[in-house]
Amino acid sequence: KAGVTQTPRYLIKTRGQQVTLSCSPISGHRSVSWYQQTPGQGLQFLFEYFSETQRNKGNFPGRFSGRQFSNSRSEMNVSTLELGDSALYLCASSGGLAGGGGEQFFGPGTRLTVL
Amino acid sequence: GENVEQHPSTLSVQEGDSAVIKCTYSDSASNYFPWYKQELGKGPQLIIDIRSNVGEKKDQRIAVTLNKTAKHFSLHITETQPEDSAVYFCAASSGGTSYGKLTFGQGTILTVHP
């Protein structure tokens, strides 16, 4: 079974631009979570989507948004990029069944650099 | 919200020794505690997890213990090998519809010297 895939793997943007990252979960998984990883703040939860609906949200500004499609693939968007948005963005998928499961499997991440 | 503290931040051991990493959590509603291993250039890899109805779980050289009363859980690696060198993260979740939201500790850099 193929793992979680994320595209692109690397991105370089300038301040003020916007960016869209993509995640394809493990086949059959319905939940996709996004995390930001930085040396200073560690791994921080951004949001989770389940069956095309945002089910949980972390403490990030509204510039960070996401969506999920009917095939469970997910995208996250960051608008008006700031230098501090430079990070590794990780996507994780799980079966997403409420009250059960819970194991999250991570992709390799997208390394975003904002200049 | 949930807060997870992880110690130590770095751990250096000789091959064959044991390594122990400890985490504490703040939210008594948390009931799912996974551990991840992250190697350079890769995403975190789930290595073991434990749920609140279990006190201990073991998988070959790796074991995790949970003390719900004290709100802490630990990762134990026995007979360490150089390939165990990586960054290890603990995490917590309150389960149910919140399974998709993990709160992570700050990570432990484990170095195993041959």
Image: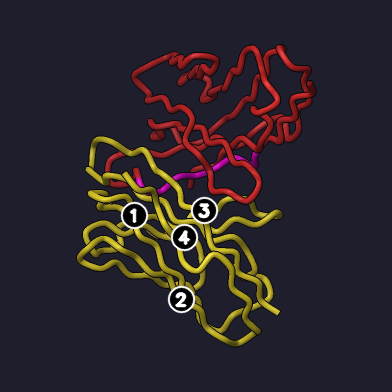
Chain colours: A yellow, B red
Crowding at dot 1, Cα within 10 Å, few <14 / some 14-19 / many 20+, comes out as: many
Crowding at dot 2, Cα within 10 Å, few <14 / some 14-19 / many 20+, comes out as: some
Q: Please give the chain letter of the residue carrying mark 3.
A: A
Alpha carbon of mark 4 to alpha carbon of mark 1: how far? Answer: 16 Å
Name the residue at 31% across, 63% down: A73
Residue matched to label 4: A46
Residue matched to label 2: A20
Q: Main secondary structure of the magenta part?
A: loop
Image quarter (top left, top right, bottom left or bottom right) of the N terminus of chain A: top left
Question: At label 2, which amino acid type do we have?
Answer: Thr
Name the residue at 48% across, 54% down: A45
Q: Which tag, 4 or 2, sits closer to the chain's start? A: 2
Q: Which tag, 2 or 1, sits closer to the chain's start? A: 2
Q: Please give the chain letter of the residue carrying mark 4.
A: A
Crowding at dot 3, Cα within 10 Å, few <14 / some 14-19 / many 20+, comes out as: many
Please determine whether, in this image, residue A64 is positioned above or below residue B109.
below
Alpha carbon of mark 2 to alpha carbon of mark 1: how far? Answer: 16 Å
Q: Which tag, 4 or 1, sits closer to the chain's start? A: 1
Alpha carbon of mark 4 to alpha carbon of mark 2: how far? Answer: 14 Å
Q: Are marks 2 and 1 on the same chain?
A: yes
In which quadrant of the rendered view does residue B21 lie?
Answer: top right
Q: Is residue B15 magenta?
A: no
Name the residue at 65% across, 68% down: A86
Residues at discs 4 and 3 in contact (Cβ within 8 Å) = no
Q: Nearer the viewer, residue B46 or B89?
A: B46
Q: Circle 2 — which element?
A: strand
Q: Circle 1 — which element?
A: loop
Image quarter (top left, top right, bottom left or bottom right) of the C terminus of chain A: bottom right
Q: Nearer the viewer, mark 4 or mark 2?
A: 2
Per the rendered image, the range of residues in magenta is B100-107
Residue matched to label 1: A25
